[in-house]
Amino acid sequence: MRRAWLTPLALALALLGAAAGAAWAVDASGDTGRTPVPHPPKAQGDHCVADTTFMRRNHMKMLFHQRNETVHLGVRGEPYSLASCVACHAVRGADGVAVSYADPRHFCRSCHDYAAVSVDCFECHASRPGDPNKAAATDAGDKDLTALNDYLKGTKP
Amino acid sequence: MSAGAAPTRLLADRRTLLKGAGAGLATLIAPGVTLYAFGADDAGARPAGEPASAKVRWGMLIDSSKCAPGCDRCVAACRDENGWQSTGHVESDPQWIRIVTVRDPKTGAQSAAPVMCQHCANPACVDVCPTGASFKRADGLVLVDRHICIGCRYCMMACPYKARSFVHEAIEDQKTNAPRGKGTVEGCTLCVDRIDAGRKPACVEACASEGGGAMTFGDLNDPSSDIAKALASLSTTQIRSDLGLDPGVRYRNL
């Protein structure tokens, strides 16, 4: 008699366990759990100017600080520039052209849409990487110069 | 454009690139230095992280007699460099740089010259700005910090040179080096990003290569600079010098 109610109980426990396991399992998109989280696209560089956790919390403070340094004091060429962020975090569409902030795939939008925080930067600033080397662009037809340019740009210390 | 002009420009660009290549090779010798800029020329770039120096005052000399009638290479170069264009409404067009023609009504003698922000030592636009957005940088450039510009346009009213304009409509696809946006005031920056990289403003470069070579750019405080030598030996004027704003842009033969 005792065994008769133990079997359904074990079955119920097993089912409950399986359901909980499914809920906590890592799905194909990398989400853990039932709460959807943003999946920012991977950047092109080897590493960011600071580690990811720090960047997530503080990138706006760094941009704010840098904008004053650059506009008022003329401090340039430091790693904390918006242009560097945009260049490294560019997301390219199927045609190979970087998407602008108007596109939901844009790096900044991937998180900001999720958090419902509006970004004003791109009302004035370019949201796509510019052409860093106009001379090379003009000479694009010249094979030797293109090769030389590629070599120089690809060279790392 | 005529077919003959293209090879010349290509040659000039090739020279720039090769100069840049030389600079690139130089940086290879020093480990830890990443190749960053191409073809920086004579003015010399400030090292990264160093603020603009108050020892420098950037200025320009424009020789109106070298401005060929109808030439607007400087305006076109500015437009390309900073990504502005006519809005289709003359009254609200951007005023980064424009060609002003002056005519003596008695004799009929005419001369033309580009007029842009005169980068005054005592700028009226800075005096009137309620937020501090219109400011003078240490090296004499008068700029607008559009992060804190509220678009009140007092500076536009204060400027006797009409060198500022207001952006009325949303803009897309700005240049990386020249952010501009709706609701803020803008004007000539003397290509501040180029100056910081040790290059000359786009208008000066274009005038030298494709125009009449009417524009000289340099440090007014450095007695050995081309512009300081020219100013010391030639008779030059400031537009509306009676206002006492001491513009950094001077004119000759106007």
Image (spheres, rainbow, N blue to C red):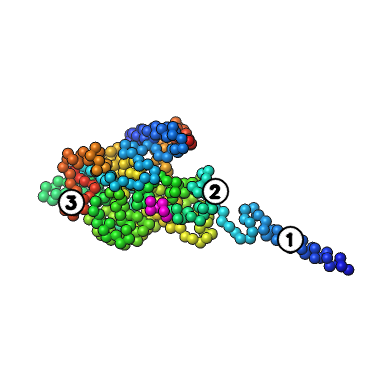
On screen, residue B242 above or below B58: below
* SS label for mark 1: helix
Looking at this view, is A145 or B136 the one in front?
A: B136
- Residue B67, given in percent of the width and then of the height, sits at 22, 42
Magenta stretch? Answer: A64-69
Residue B37 is inside the magenta segment: no
Front: mark 1 or 3: 1
Mark 2–mark 1 distance (CA, rounded to whole Å): 35 Å
In the image, which disc is placed on residue B241?
3
Task: Give the crowd class for mark 1: few <14, some 14-19, many >=20 residues within 10 Å.
Answer: few
Write down the quadrant of residue A20 in the picture: bottom right
Write down the quadrant of residue B16 in the picture: top left
Q: Residue at x 38, y 51 (%)?
A: A69
Q: Is any part of residue A66 visible from this angle?
A: yes
What residue did someone put label 1 on?
A: A17
Residue reaching furthest right?
A1
Kind of residue indicated by mark 3: Ser
Mark 1–mark 3 distance (CA, rounded to whole Å): 86 Å
The chain letter for the residue carrying disc 3 is B
* SS label for mark 3: helix
